[in-house]
Each structure stands twice: as structure tokens, then as C-alpha cells.
Image (cartoon, rainbow, N blue to C red):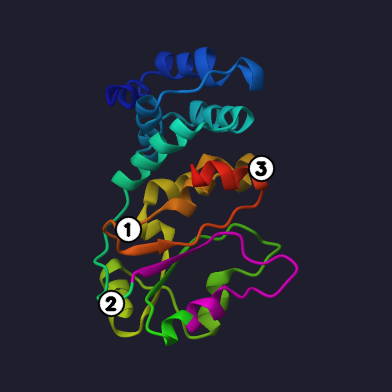
Amino acid sequence: GRGFGRLLLDFAEAEAVLQQRVGRGARGARDLTREQAEGVFGAMLDGQVPALELGALLIALRVKGESADEMAGFLAAMQARTAALTAPAGPRTVLLPSFNGARKQANLMPLVAQLLAREGVPVLVFGRHDFDSRVSPFELLEVLDLPASPGLTDAERRLREERLAVLPLQLLNPGLNELMALRPRLGVRNSAHSLAKLLDPFPAGRSVRVVAVTHPEYLDSMAA
């Protein structure tokens, strides 16, 4: 249960998770239960898993693929560690995660955000950027006079007054930000990249998540 995450502090237990469950290849691996997944991902977010075991777990999960129960457990762990924001009055706040930038075409995300805000719909853009080969969406927003807020209080004020705010992921969920930052070092995306698109800092029923998917199979898993 919840103690499962704490057990990962012990090298032997972390090794056991790899050897007995997720680290046995695409065919031999077994899925974690929802409760186990919440404990494991919580330990990852809290920085409790040693670097070697963390990298191995992330790669093993990528090879195996996350089950719906694992994603639900990961989501619960992420949400429990995500900063809470006060939702502005009026329409639900639209959440626009931005992590990849644009590779070949114009990045229209800022236009979408500005059009919604112009109609009185609050918009929160959040994320991080790890691609040297692409223009950072946050640099683009800065040029458009939409700088990232330095803190949560400023973001809440901007949502109330201007209907549009930008936040670095680091301010919403530092642990998730650290996991995503491993992409250049590991060379591949990990479970955190899927989970980040589901992050919601607002009370239930006060937001609309816009979730982009890069591959058709993710449409099913994200919907589940």
C-alpha cells in the first residue's frame, strides 16, 4: 500500500520491484496494482528512489507500457503533490500544457490562449521545454508580452485580472519537473511526460484539460 513507496528507500526493495515486476521485458513484466503504482510514483516524485534504480524503473516502464491502473495510481500520486490554485470566478479555467514546442509548423498555442482570454475564459499555460532544436513556447510567450509568473499568487492574480497566466511546471510540481528533466539524459520520454498532461491544480469541476497525444494508443490510455 502506501508503505510500498517508502520501501523503495531500501536498495533491495527497489531492486525487487525491477526484478519481479516491471523489469522483466515487454512479455514477462507484470503490472503494478493501482495502490502499488501510487506508492512507487510517489517515491519517484519525492526523490526517494536512488538514481540508478530510478533510471531503470523509468526505462522498464517505458518498455512494458503503463496499464490503466498504473496510470490512475501515478495520477493520484501526482495530484497529491501538485500545488493548489484558487480558480477565478466565471467559466472554468482552460489548462493548456506545453512541453514540446513546434517542430515544423507555427506554434498556435499562444493564439488559442489569447482568443479564449479575450472571450473571458481564463487560461493557464504551464509546462517546461527540453528541446534545443525547437523554439521554446515560453520564449515565444515572453515575446508576446505573456511572461511566466514568478509565483503562484501572481498567476492567480493574472487569471482574475487578465484571464491568462503562464507557469513553469517547477512551481506546480517540482518532483514531476525533475522526472521530466531526465529526458535529455535518458534519451527517451518517461511516464511523467504522459502524466504531466493530466495535471490539474484547480478544485474539481473548475477546469477543462486540453490533453494532446502524440500516438493513437495514448488516446485510449489517457481517456481511460
Q: Residues within 10 Å of mark 1 (few under 14, many from 20)?
A: many
Query: Which of the two discs, 2 and 3, sits closer to the camera?
Result: 2
Q: Please rate how many residues cluster around mark 2, counting C-alpha atoms within 10 Å: few if below 14, some from 14 to 19, many from 20.
A: few
How far from the left and from the top, in percent, is residue 219?
59, 48
Q: Nearer the viewer, mark 1 or mark 2?
A: 2
Indicate which disc residue 184 carries.
none
Lower position in the chain sequence, tag 2 or tag 3 = 2
Type of amino acid at the residue the image marks with label 2: Gly
Q: Which residue is mark 1?
A: 201
Q: Earlier in the sequence, mark 1 or mark 2?
A: 2
Work out how far the residue at label 1 is from the one at label 3, CA to CA, in angstroms. 29 Å
On the image, which quarter does residue 27 sit in? top right
- Residue visible at 37% across and 73% down in the picture: 149
**Left-right relation of 152 to 212:** left
The mark that comes first in sequence, 1 or 3, is 3
Whether residue 222 is situated above or below residue 132 in the rendered picture: above
Q: Secondary structure at mark 2?
A: loop
How far across and how far down the image is residue 81, in percent? 31, 46
Q: Amino acid at mark 3?
A: Gly
Question: Which residues are drawn in magenta?
Answer: 92-115
Q: Which residue has dot 2 on it?
A: 90
- Tell me which amino acid carries mark 1: Pro
Image height check: is 110 above or below 220?
Answer: below
The residue identified by callout 3 is 187
Crowdedness near tag 3: few (<14), some (14–19) or many (≥20) residues, C-alpha within 10 Å: few
Under circle 3, the secondary element is loop
Which callout, 1 or 3, points to the residue nearer the camera?
A: 1
Q: Nearer the viewer, residue 72 or 195?
A: 72
- Alpha carbon of mark 2 to alpha carbon of mark 3: how far? 42 Å
